[in-house]
Image (cartoon, grey):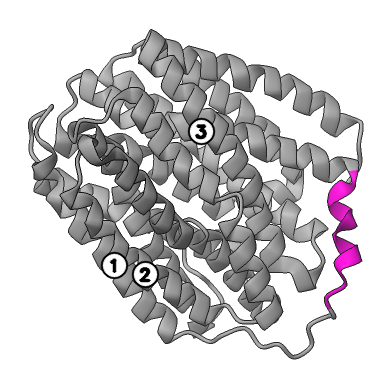
Amino acid sequence: MISPQNNHRGAWHFATLQFLSFASLSLLGTYGNVYFKRRGLSDIQLGILFAVPSAVSIFSPMIWGLTSDLLQRRKPIVITMHLVSAVLFPLFWFLSSQTFVLICIIMGLFSFFFRPSIPLIDTWTLDYLSNKGGDYGRIRSWGSVGYMVPLLLSILIFSSSSGGTAEVLLPMFFGVSGFRLLAAIQASYMPDMSPSGREKMDWKALKIYLHPFAIVFFFCVFVRSFVFSPFFAFFNVYLDTLGVTDNMKGLPWIVAVGAEVIMLAFSNKLIQRFGAVTAIICAYVAMAIRFFVLAAAPSWEIILVVQLLHAFTFGAYHLAAIQIINRITPEAFRATGQTLVSVIGGIGGILGNLIGGVWASSYGYVVLYRYLGLSVSVATIILVIAFSNCKE
């Protein structure tokens, strides 16, 4: 079902790179926030800390994307990103809340190399598929599988108790850096983009981003990042307060990404039938439901069930967003277009993490998710009206 398909050996190379890149992301996303909380950071400090990657995302993806488009090379940039981030990440092990400013500085450097690697890998994958053919969703689904595998192993590796010390999360550091190093090695064996046949870079072509449809789409990207950044930042900390053990903190994400894999396997056909805009609206409705359920302080079983909505909030949304930006962006600026989405998302993430940190600190996690649900509900209404009044 999730075979990269077509008899192209290269497709398996890209699937493997997606697998390794998302394996490191899953460990960082699931246990990183818990680690920093146990190092003594407050909710407001967590909000500020996780706003740093969003701030870096305002300029770093564009730097890497423009460099890649100008050089018409993906391979050396992807390898560099993975190697440097693998070296920087272990530095967090030696820091505590007393060195908060230094933590933020290292987070900025780490994010400069870590965050833009995913959209650039997506661009590299799309370059390959435009020449060889194939289904992006099926290749990308291996990234989702890579996200799940370390979390399955974490059930055996991490403690079966809750509220432990930061030191028990040491395996996360080996996992994040290890998978980044393996991804760099994998990328070194892959074919780079050929510059032949590429259209000339005409900067005036970027005026397409001022089209009403593009503006509405970027608003959609902004809002999603605004609500999802604090959701990711505080979800596992929230689970910690609910008494969920360390080895079970990955289970909700195993369920979520499992649903995502299934959606990615079929989403290409669904989007062809119903359209990318419909997929985005469905994702927004699912987001609102997901946040409102979490705001009700549900049982462990309900938390696992509501994670199935990740099939829409990420699986359907991600492929629809990739297709839209790839469709409206001139070919010569393909990497720039993909990274521009990260820039807009970075701005939303800054505000989301800062405001989310204040909400969590002042009112608690239940109110945080209630406010996120209200925010995405209002945005859904705006998007339905806006998309219905502008054409792509």
Residue 34's place in the image compared with 369, above or below, is below
3 vs 1, front mark = 1
CB atoms of marks 3 and 1 within 8 Å:
no
Report the span colored magenta.
201-211
Residue 159 at x, y percent in the picture = 8, 39
Name which residue type carries label 2.
Answer: Val
Left or right: residue 26 compared with residue 174:
right
Residue 79's place in the image compared with 240, above or below, is below
Name which residue type carries label 1.
Answer: Val
In the drawing, what numbered circle is on residue 84? 2
Judging depth in this view, the residue of 300 and 213 nearest the camera is 213
Q: How many residues crowd mark 2 within 10 Å: few (<14), some (14–19), many (20+)?
A: some
Q: Circle 1 sits in a helix, a strand or a loop, which is it?
A: helix
Kindly identify which residue carries mark 3: 228
Residue 85 at x, y percent in the picture = 36, 64
Left or right: residue 52 compared with residue 300:
right
CB atoms of marks 3 and 2 within 8 Å:
no
Q: How many residues crowd mark 1 within 10 Å: few (<14), some (14–19), many (20+)?
A: some
Name which residue type carries label 3.
Answer: Phe
Residue 327 at x, y percent in the picture = 79, 59
Residue 277's place in the image compared with 291, above or below, is below
In the drawing, what numbered circle is on residue 87? 1
Q: Earlier in the sequence, mark 3 or mark 2?
A: 2
